[in-house]
Amino acid sequence: MTASLNILRRGAILLALVSSAGLAVAKNVPGDAAIPVAELMPLTMKHEADLKLSTEQIQALADFRKQAMPSRVAVQKKIVELRGQLRMAILDNQPAADREALMKQIADAEVEHFKGRDRCVEALRKILSAEQFAQLSKLYLAGLR
């Protein structure tokens, strides 16, 4: 009988450990990445031929991507990490001041992300002709759900 109780106790301890570890693993979720307010660059690349981009435009777009991508990726990663930290702070009932500080950091990172997307659209306005940009905008808006 005592052997059965020991097995049950060990099983309960193991279950508790696995359950608490599950929360720690769930901190960062890929779906936490901020949905871009405007994301035109992938569409521009996909519809390069339809937009009739010149060699110079293709090179200018490649240059912009090379320059802008590292900071964009870093901001998106930061948002995911901060959201994971906030999730755990809420679930762990950390002090309200700590949770609010994380919320502020997330808001600041989101604004940084918005500004990066805005810079990208402005670069596209400069690189593309007005007609190309209008065509790209229509393609983008048609694809939103």
Image (tube, grey):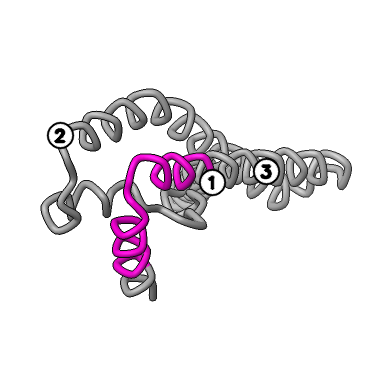
Relative placement, left or right, of 68 versus 34 is: left
Q: Nearer the viewer, mark 1 or mark 2?
A: 2
Q: Which residues are magenta?
A: 118-140
Residue drawn at x 39%, y 76% is 145
Which amino acid type is shown beneath numbered disc 2? Thr
Q: Are marks 1 and 3 in contact (CB under 8 Å)?
A: no
Residue 126 coordinates in the image, percent (x, y):
41, 41
Q: CA distance from mark 1 to mark 3?
A: 18 Å
Name the element at disc 1. Answer: helix
* Residue identifier under label 2: 55
**Tally of numbered tags:** 3
Q: CA distance from mark 1 to mark 2?
A: 24 Å
Say which mark, if any, is on residue 106: 3
Relative placement, left or right, of 12 versus 125 is: right
Residue 54 coordinates in the image, percent (x, y):
17, 40
Which amino acid type is shown beneath numbered disc 1? Asp
- Predominant SS of the magenta segment: helix
Q: Nearer the viewer, mark 2 or mark 3?
A: 2
Residue 104 coordinates in the image, percent (x, y):
77, 43
Q: CA distance from mark 2 to mark 3?
A: 39 Å
Residue drawn at x 38%, y 70% is 141
Answer yes or no: is residue 7 visible: yes
Q: Nearer the viewer, residue 42 or 14?
A: 42
Relative placement, left or right, of 126 versus 95 is: left
Residue 123 on the magenta span: yes
Dot placed on the residue nearer the N-terminal end, 1 or 2? 2
